[in-house]
Amino acid sequence: MRAAVFHGPEDLRFEERPRPASSRNELLLEVGACAICGSDLRTYRFGARNITAPVVIGHEVAGTVVEVGGALTDWRVGERVAVAPAIPCCECFCCRRGLPTMCDNLRSIGYEYDGGFADYMIVPWSAVRAGCVNRVPAPLSLEEATLAEPLACAINGQELLGMRLDDTVAILGAGPLGLMHADLARIRGARKIILIDVRAHRLELARAFAADVLIDGASEDVAARVLAETEGAGASVVIVATSSAEAQAQALTLAAKRGRVSFFGGLPKSDPIASLNANLIHYRELFVTGAYGSAPWHSRIALELLTSGRIHAAGLIGLVVPLEGLLEGFATAAEGRVLKVVVKPRL
């Protein structure tokens, strides 16, 4: 089989490998589609702390079961599935308390396990046991099913924010996850959704999604505009859906009193310090939370939402490339010319 194998920073090799065989408690997938995530770009450029090279990268994956281990009775050859890549151990302190995103022994497909930028992929027993494998409903394409992984992360982030029907929501970052957050906020009944980006072309791509107000942060006074759009109160919820320390600091200035702020996008590990006005948190009694990853059940919810059409799945996918076009896909995703790039090994 063909596979895109990460050997080190900017050392990605397209290799021929034997097709893997599943053990008695594993599944073998024929990969139908695997989307490119921002973390894939970072891994390609810089590596990752938890990666075990050489490894096949790619973790937003959907495919068809072609082999079922003899010990597994709930799965059948021919079923289409999406795989949640973050695999909790189900045994540590956090897992026992229902907090799998905080698992002390979290392992991930595309990092510790071979991922989806290949013709075939093994789903390990740990992923099957943890509920990370979900059937893809018939109306949904495998390309669209790859969006379940990032959407699941957005669902987790909004659960932590406790979204309410009367919320006004400001989202910093009009990338794929910012737009998913906008759609989710609409589903949760938000009163007004404000989407902010400093790239005009991103805002143009965002027009088909759920935001009521688009703000170009490169040409407008964002804080003044948000106050004008919220009757002078500020946004009750602010989501930072971009990896920017400046956006994290700005988010505090946009939040209403007792507002909730999500630092959804992590900062680069080489520069993780943000300079924040802590008095805004103190005097406005703001609630600031992080959001990291998702639990297996979030992926099931994500697939249901994608199938229902309430998330603009098809509008998110701007380019589909074959496996050999992966580096082209990386370049396109890095430039932000499209929202989401999907790799189809057999395109």
Image (tube, rainbow, N blue to C red):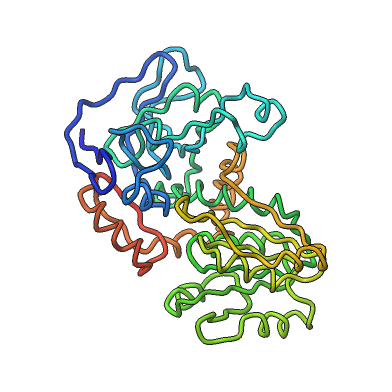
Q: Quadrant of the N terminus?
A: top left
Which quadrant would residue 201 be assigned to in this image?
Answer: bottom left
128 over 5 or under it: above or below: above
Horizontal and vertical percent position of residue 120: 30, 33
Q: Residue at x 48, y 56 (%)?
A: 271
320 sits to left or right of 229: left
53 over 251 or under it: above or below: above
Q: Residue at x 22, y 53 (%)?
A: 325
Horizontal and vertical percent position of residue 121: 34, 32
301 and 237: which is toward the camera: 237
Say how many tags the image has.
0
Which quadrant would residue 104 be assigned to in this image?
Answer: top right
Horizontal and vertical percent position of residue 263: 62, 57
Q: Residue at x 46, y 12 (%)?
A: 71
171 sits to left or right of 165: left
Horizontal and vertical percent position of residue 151: 54, 52
146 sits to left or right of 188: left
339 sits to left or right of 239: left
78 over 282 or under it: above or below: above
Q: Residue at x 52, y 87 (%)?
A: 219
Residue sticking out furthest to the left: 16
